[in-house]
Image: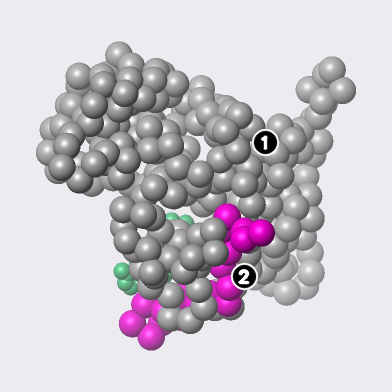
Amino acid sequence: MDKLINITDASFQYNKKNIFHNLNFQLNQGEILCLFGPNGCGKSTLLMCLLGLLQLDRGSVSLQGQNIEALSPRKIAQQIAYVPQVHKKTFPYKVIDIVLMGRAAKTPFFGGPDEDDLQIAENALELVGMKRYRDTPYTMLSGGETQLVMLARALAQETPIIIMDEPTAHLDFRHELIILENMVRLVKEQGVSVIMATHFPNHAFYFENERIATSVALMNNHTFAAYGEPNKVLTEENMKKTFRIRSKLVSYDLGMDKSIRQIIPVNTIEAREYSEGV
Ligand SMILES: Nc1ncnc2c1ncn2[C@@H]1O[C@H](COP(=O)(O)OP(=O)(O)OP(=O)(O)O)[C@@H](O)[C@H]1O
């Protein structure tokens, strides 16, 4: 059977500047892939290629066996919802109207959203705890609130795949957990698959701890320096190689036979120390 999403030998350049090359990975239904790596290593660029918004120089992205280049934007939007890192706000649409835009790929060409679409959008707002902002112009929202509305829009889109670019970047602890809990619920209850760029390795441990099939791709030096299960990729050694930092991997007992792994960044390592293998 075709994989839900399959990336083969993917390479991309901006104006002849190599961003990444020869990337390979696959994602099945109900799995999460966390893209992790230093600022500027190419995570957002890779996500844009997966969304069909940028074209690979070499290699291919296929969705359920179909090359993405052969799919219309509407067809892609029926398969993939996108939660962007930053969202440029141009017009003071009401929050509910922004969420309803998630329904666009499901509504007929000549006709607006119907009662069902509205109900789905209302439910999505409720799930992310933003219902009270329903009629607020979204230009008046904070960064974190905007992020939650973008998640609600993606939920309303009801796609088998969600791509998220640093979805918790602006969020306080509670709202970060609201996003993570929603992701877990979507994966477990609806079999949604998620690809997310994140600067927080502990997100991968969070999903693993929720018994979700989770993989981590560690991007560095234009390629996947490591790829696999969180405990194989998110090691103190790989943190040192990738970020030139010293870190500590700990396992914290949550009680009731549950524990969670966490990486704690400790300090940066000077180039001299690094080359001496400290
Ligand atoms: N439109 C563009 N034209 C040329 N170069 C670009 C363009 N957009 C991004 N880049 C460059 O491509 C590289 C990868 O950028 P990208 O935004 O994909 O990185 P990232 O891993 O998502 O970074 P961050 O973690 O900081 O969000 C960077 O060096 C960036 O400067």
| 271 displayed left or right of 252 | left
Task: State yes or no: residue 9 in magenta.
Answer: yes
Instruction: Place residue 133 in its image quadrant.
Output: top left
| 51 displayed left or right of 111 | right
Q: Secondary structure at mark 2?
A: strand
Vertical placement of 222 versus 6: above or below?
A: below
Q: Residues within 10 Å of mark 2 (few under 14, many from 20)?
A: some
Q: Earlier in the sequence, mark 2 or mark 1?
A: 2
- Name which residue type carries label 1: Tyr
- Name which residue type carries label 2: Asn
Instruction: Name the residue carrying label 1.
Output: 206
Depth order, front residue of 276/91 = 91
Dominant secondary structure, magenta: strand
x and y, in percent, of residue 250 in the image? 79, 39
Vertical placement of 256 versus 162: above or below?
A: above
Region in magenta: 1-20
The picture quadrant for ligand 1 comes to: bottom left
Instruction: Name the residue carrying label 2.
Output: 24
- Image quarter of the C terminus: bottom right
- Image quarter of the N terminus: bottom right
Q: Residue at x 39, y 20 (%)?
A: 123
Q: Residue at x 43, y 24 (%)?
A: 128
Task: State yes or no: residue 4 in magenta.
Answer: yes
Instruction: Place residue 30 in its image quadrant.
Output: top right
Mark 2–mark 1 distance (CA, rounded to whole Å): 24 Å
Depth order, front residue of 150/107 = 107
x and y, in percent, of residue 57 in the image? 43, 81
x and y, in percent, of residue 86 in the image? 33, 46
Q: Is mark 2 within 8 Å of ligand 1?
A: no
Q: Secondary structure at mark 1?
A: helix
Q: Residue at x 77, y 72 (%)?
A: 276
